[in-house]
Image (tube, helix red, strand yellow):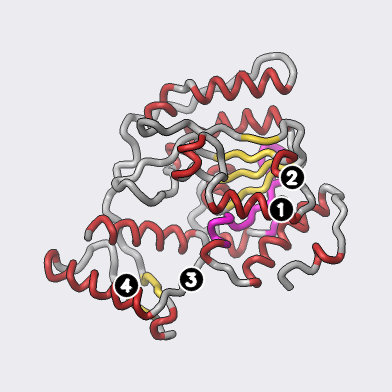
Amino acid sequence: MRAELDALVFELKQLRKEGCESVYIGDETLSGLRNAIEAYRELHGKPEEMERVAADGMGSEALVVEKPRKVVAVKATTVEIPKAPEIVLPEGSKETQRDWLRDRVLKDLVCQAHVKPGKQVVFGVGSIDAKIFFCGEAPGAEEEAQGEPFVGLAGQLLTKIIGAMGLKREQVYIGNIMNWRPEMPTTYGNRPPTMEEMTYCLPFLKAQVAVVKPEVIVALGKTAVDGLLGVDKSRRMGSIRGKWDTFEGIPLMPTYHPSYLLRNQSNATKREVWEDLLLVMEKLEMPINEKQRGFFQ
């Protein structure tokens, strides 16, 4: 029971971090959750990691966490993370540099030490001549299994978004802040990487940016923004999305992660992401037809 509650709290904290104020659940699910919490309380007393988990004034239509105070400590790593490496790209063509860098990442001993048996370190994919570099946060279960970023449900949605822009997945570059899936105390679920983890992997991402030399970087989700620009606890996706910033001198557009869209499938939310990408298309002087401008309105 404790593992399930821990996983729920992690997910809710991630949703709050992404700017979500509530999530819809049905009466049956809410009732089951209340029963689970009561059963936990009977055995262990009130869970320390929640002050209250209950429905708000909307009745059973939403689940909220009020004032999350403490999360049970998670051992984020199985080995100590050393100082971030210095990456110096070799002379040569983009292909030569990309191949050298991929080999360097896949053979990195720290990255390998954090990958579960049978899973893979994940390196970026796509065109090394891409104008757009999509940057995510960390691999999930599907990504560490295939060794490629954005291949799960969120990745499938990202591919559709790229297609709506009039491009193919092969025409853009897709990478992550992290080269491995952050360890969890359970066999399921994901957690945001720590700043220590992102700091170690950041030189590898910077090197990928240096190889590709994109004209625009799209940061997918707050964790990606924090990894690129540094952690700012006051930063909220709802206030920074759609506003240009820079990374390594390259224009950077923050927007919601595709997984956020999977959890919040309103046209209003989809429109926000699409408006951000319209700004990207306009900056790159890509053709935009009336149908594209009217998506999700």
Query: Mark 3 and mark 2: span between their CA atoms?
Result: 33 Å
Amino acid type at circle 1 is Trp
Q: Nearer the viewer, residue 261 or 141?
A: 141
What residue is shown at x 64% (from left), y 59% (from top)? 241
| Residue 250 visible, this orientation | no
For disc 4, the marked residue is 53
Residue 94 seen in render? yes
Q: Name the side, left or right, on which 16 lies relative to 174.
A: left
- Which numbered mark, 1 or 2, is in the foreground of this view? 2
Callout 2, which amino acid?
A: Lys
Q: Position of residue 41 (x, y in %)?
A: 17, 69
Q: Residue at x 46, y 32 (%)?
A: 120
Q: Amino acid at mark 4?
A: Val
Q: Secondary structure at mark 3?
A: loop
Q: Which residue is mark 2?
A: 168
Q: Mark 1 vs mark 2: which is more N-terminal? A: 2
What whole-number distance in Å separates the C-alpha atoms at marks 1 and 4?
A: 36 Å
Range of residues picked out in magenta:
242-261
Q: Earlier along the polypeptide chain: callout 1 or callout 4?
A: 4
Foreground: disc 4 or disc 2: 2
Say above or below: 266 vs 199: below
**Residue placed under numbered mark 1 in the picture:** 244
The Cα atoms of the two marked residues, 3 and 1, are separated by 24 Å
Q: Earlier in the sequence, mark 3 or mark 2?
A: 3
Report the disc number at residue 21. Answer: 3
Q: CA distance from mark 3 to mark 4?
A: 13 Å
- Residue 11 x/y as whole percent: 40, 59
Q: Residues within 10 Å of mark 4 (few under 14, many from 20)?
A: some
Is 154 on the left or on the right of 190, as rendered?
right
Q: Identify the image quadrant of residue 151.
A: top right
